[in-house]
Image: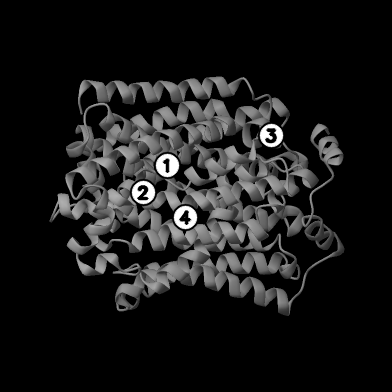
Amino acid sequence: MGTLDWVVIAGYFLVMVWIGWWSKRRIKNASDFFVAGGKVPWWLVGISHHMSGYSAAVFVGYAALAYTTGFAVYVWWALSITAACVIGTIFFAPRWPRLRQRLGIISPLEYLATRFNVATEQLLAWSGALLKIFDVAAKWTASAILLNVFAGVPMVWGILLVGGVTMFYSTIGGIWADVLTDFGQFVIQFVAAIALAIAVMMRLDGIATPITMWQQLPPDHALPFNGTLTLGFFTAYIVIATLSYNGGTWNLAMRMIATENGRAAQRSLILSGALYLIWPLVLFFPMWAAPLILPDLAQPDQSYALLATQLLPQGLIGLVLAGMFAHTMAMTSSDSNAIASVVVRDIIPQFRKGKSFLPEKSELFFSRLITFLFITFSMIIALTSDSFGGVLGLLILWFGALVGPVAVPMLFGMLPAFRRSGSSAALISTAGGLLMFALNRWAIADWVKTLGDNSQAWTVATPVLVSIVLFVGIGFLKPENTPETDALIDSLSTDLPEDADAEGAAA
């Protein structure tokens, strides 16, 4: 890293701080802080939804998979999310803003008290908040690895630097700061990724490199499924991605809640899905070509960073690193925003007399305080990430396996096909999925290892499958739907008239 690179990085951090400060002026209450009152344009939500799927972990953990397995990483990751967006456009996306229209929610779990009961809301709130700490911690760790490779900054200081800047702008700026920094990282990533792709082509066979490189790489690198990225794992991850990218990851639910209406939410998800289909082909190209330029790497998770430092001139190296920081900071900021909404709207009221929400000013203060505390705890986990299996262990084996049991009642509960499933189905299905994860992790871990390349698919798939079977089965055997829950579910099939929506927002 040269002086110009450090200037670019410093400039990026200053812009992030400025965005947070500018966004602060648009926030008058907790609704503005969490969902912008439903006023975020659909195209900005679409870009934000897309960019929220990236973090520095893509350039560390996924770069390692691209280096060792090749094209399969695109099939497993990008195509599974594209499929999830298509499914979500039809079933899930339009229902989120309609919940805001009808119930005034500003947390993705608020409606669960009406749809199921308070116990279900609390179980998902507590378990989901704890789960998200691991996911965010993986992203801090990945950022620190990149900063260490690029500039030799110790891991501890890397985590504290990136986490500290994110803590500032997300604590004061809310969702407006999140979506605007997502858009900023979209622009930065576009320039940086194109620059590195051109540099790789110039180093190898020119414009023909995306075709000719496969003839020089190991034959299995061109396969759609390779190593642990098997067909079974891909199929399992479509289910996981469908739940995660349609609201099981709470910050993505809040993106859709922040749109004007169901039609706008659908358009945003179509845009995000189209970007997932196309853009990762450009982004992963240097990672696939890395074995030809950097053969026999002992640490494949450093491949992307090493390519950038070897092939790019000063200034562009800093831009690539800024882009990687942008991914992590935008994603973790939005995650923190979502967690704070759940704590403030779903957890704290249960400890208040009368189970009431906090007063408006107090609610905004606690929204910012919880955001601050969540980032702090996730940074502490990041500093001890090795004990959880490193970046990929945190991302795939912990978050990937646990997000399903938490998401099944929340997403399936909106759909008419599952109206018979009530609070018993929700509670037992979540508990069953979490228990299956614990069994895989500790009780039958030795047996799972005997599955070889399919062990990862088993670990990720079985918790969510157990949850789905229990949620549907218990609803069939013990229906608990009521006229009130049926009316709520049916109301989510259409948008409110514009004048009615405006009156509801004003109220």
Labels 1 & 2 near each other (Cβ < 8 A)? no
Amino acid type, mark 2: Val
Amino acid type, mark 4: Leu
- The color scheme shown is one colour
| Residues at marks 3 and 1, CA–CA distance in whole angstroms | 30 Å
| Residues at marks 2 and 3, CA–CA distance in whole angstroms | 32 Å
Q: Nearer the viewer, mark 3 or mark 1?
A: 3
Q: Which residue is mark 3?
A: 39
Report the disc number at residue 282: 2
Q: Which residue is mark 4?
A: 277
Please tell me which residue is depicted at 49% across the width and 65% down the height of the picture.
238
Please tell me which residue is depicted at 16% across the width and 54% down the height of the picture.
292
Where residue 83 sits in the image (x, y, percent)? 53, 62
| Residues at marks 1 and 2, CA–CA distance in whole angstroms | 31 Å
- The quadrant of the picture occupied by the N terminus is top left
Please tell me which residue is depicted at 77% across the width and 57% down the height of the picture.
493
| Residues at marks 4 and 2, CA–CA distance in whole angstroms | 10 Å
From the viewer's side, name the closer residue of 422 and 238: 238
16 left or right, relative to 494:
left
321 left or right, relative to 108:
left
- The quadrant of the picture occupied by the C terminus is top right
Q: Which residue is mark 1?
A: 378
| Residues at marks 4 and 1, CA–CA distance in whole angstroms | 31 Å
Question: Would you identify the image quadrant in which residue 411 lies?
Answer: bottom right
- Numbered disc 4: secondary structure: helix
